Image (cartoon, rainbow, N blue to C red):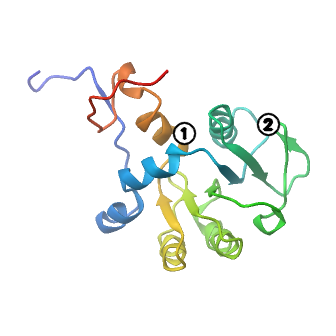
Amino acid sequence: MGSGTSLVCDLGLKTTLTPEQQKRFQDPATIRRILSRPGTVAIVGLSSDPQKASYFVASYLQKRGWKIIPVTPKPGRILGEESVRDLASIQERVDVVDIFRPPADVPPIVEQAIAIKAGVVWMQLKLANATAAERAAAAGLTVVADKCMKMEHGRHFGGLHTAGMNTGLISARRLQR
């Protein structure tokens, strides 16, 4: 194509993580493994506003078989699920804790995720806290940081490449519909 503009959009986004942290907390094989089996995801900071990113991600995941647990101080229901105040209030196994809170708020959430023995801590785009990520990893949790669950699911399983997005993945597999 030469040096001109490309018809392909690149999903590469600026990150706050060091190259070493990117290798540890943004590993494509780990992300694919997490997203390949829908389970229970506690979404910390889930908003009831359909215009917010957290709502959009939760709705997307729910439609793809994930059970969502809204974690927010506001009582009520979001996407048909009763919200809880904190991770300690959840009475079932949590596979993934997806965090939609500012980086400064992440360390105590990670401590709660460790306490409930969650399998994965996922820090959304631009909301990563490297110290908290290291703490979660040291406690034995799988960590994904500075990535969006919805975007990564679309990248690995949802056919973003068919819309001209450069997903950074090469595969001879046909998309299952």
Image-quadrant location for residue 63:
top right
Query: Circle 2 is placed at which residue position?
Result: 79
User: Disc 1 on helix, strand or loop?
Assistant: helix
User: Which one is nearer the viewer's eye here, 126 or 46?
Assistant: 46
Q: Is residue 164 above or below residue 47?
A: above
User: Disc 2 on helix, strand or loop?
Assistant: loop
Which residue is outermost to the right? Answer: 75
Q: Position of residue 17 (x, y in %)?
A: 39, 63
Image-quadrant location for residue 176:
top left
Image-quadrant location for residue 52:
top right
Q: Could you tell me which residue is drawn at 38 percent across and 45 percent down?
A: 13
Query: Circle 1 is placed at which residue position?
Result: 150
Q: Could you tell me which residue is drawn at 78 percent across and 60 percent down?
A: 92
On-image quarter of the N terminus: top left
User: Which one is nearer the viewer's eye here, 92 or 162?
Assistant: 92
User: Which one is nearer the viewer's eye here, 96 or 55?
Assistant: 96
Q: Is residue 157 above or below residue 124?
A: above
How far is disc 1 from disc 2 in space, using C-alphas? 16 Å
Q: Position of residue 134 (x, y in %)?
A: 47, 75
